[in-house]
Image (cartoon, helix red, strand yellow):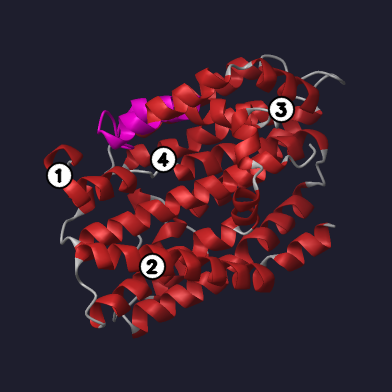
Amino acid sequence: MKRLQALEGLRGYAAFLVFLVHFCGLVAARGLGIDPDATSIFDARGPLAVALFFFRSHYGVDLFFVLSGLLMADIAARRWPGTRTFLARRALRIYPAYLAAGALALAAGLWIFGRRITPGELAANAAMLHGFAVLDIAPVNPVTWSLSYEVAFYLAVPLLALAWGRRAPGTRPANAAWILAACFVAIVAVAAALPFKRAMYLAYFALFIPGLWLGMMDEESRVRAARNLPTGLALGAWIAFTLAFKLGVFSAADPLYYVASAAACGLLVLKTCDGASLPGRLLASRPALALGRISYSFFLVHFIVLHVLGEALVKAGVTQPAAFAAALFAAGFALSLAAAWALFHVAESFYFGRRS
């Protein structure tokens, strides 16, 4: 698959959505004294309503899952290097920046916030088990919960490559669409049926499946499908899904959420594959591409930057909500970009150099 610039920009958009969640959550908690997870948007007025509206942007992670599914399916179907090489490359791609950001989060938590973490919890974080809520493991860097799903998904990709390798030449595996649909339903149903607290979040695994379907298509077919997909349908589905989540129609604890997210994210990713479309052009803009290039490092460090900066602002006496929010956004976004740029060049750029 040729690297489509718009998909890189879509990663930047997803990273910015994740930034909004933590920025607005911190404004609500530190600036307004409200727990954003426990407050309904319908009970809020003025600045709090605005903060809660943008706080409910958690679906940025969903886009990352669909995009990962697309990329991994393309690798498994057309450029499979072998299981050992694949897993080694994934480890090189994920772990250096993850460990570096984890060290920063550990230092910030200990020195600034007095937060302690046990050796067992540290080992579980190193193994990326902390993202599975049913295990109730304290995270070192809370934003990285989604990487537990990513790494577990990577371990399953060799099975996809094996299934693809057994197909008849020039075809997709028989009944691929039905198999993927059945897997999606099974994952959501099992997650809903498990008797453990927060087991429903295991249904996030289902969000890789729309990406798998897109990645199994050859590039020509995918672009043709993207061009035939009405822009209004793709954007309308995305807007409807995001508004429904923001307004509390469903949450990630509801099975319906994963069905709606899979449809909305899948359509948006597919339409982005048409570089001439409105989403394709917007996401291929310089700001989106610049953030997309460092999106992984930005994702890893922004939470740390925001919380350290928020603590500093409070200690400096910047507690008036509007001033706190303005300073946190302007300085927090700029510092997160700077930290992400540094982390990218220290812990990521070598990987892309090797791949080149």
Q: Earlier in the sequence, mark 4 or mark 3?
A: 4
Check the picture and name the quadrant holding the N terminus.
Answer: top right
Q: Give the numbered dot on residue 202.
A: 4
Q: Residues within 10 Å of mark 1 (few under 14, many from 20)?
A: some
Residue behind mark 2: 306
Viewer-side label of 4, 2: 2
Viewer-side label of 2, 3: 2
Q: Is residue 25 above or below residue 267?
A: below
Q: Position of residue 195 (x, y in %)?
A: 27, 37
Residue behind mark 3: 216
The amino acid type of the residue labelled 3 equals Met
Q: Is residue 193 visible to the viewer in this orientation of the structure? A: no
Q: Position of residue 172 (x, y in %)?
A: 76, 20
The amino acid type of the residue labelled 1 equals Ala
Q: Earlier in the sequence, mark 2 or mark 1?
A: 1
- Label 3 and label 1: CA atoms lie apart by 45 Å
Q: Give the numbered dot on residue 44.
A: 1
Check the picture and name the quadrant holding the C terminus.
Answer: bottom right
Q: Position of residue 249 (x, y in %)?
A: 26, 28
Q: Residues within 10 Å of mark 4 (few under 14, many from 20)?
A: many
Question: SS class of the residue under badge 2?
Answer: helix
Q: Residues within 10 Å of mark 2 (few under 14, many from 20)?
A: many
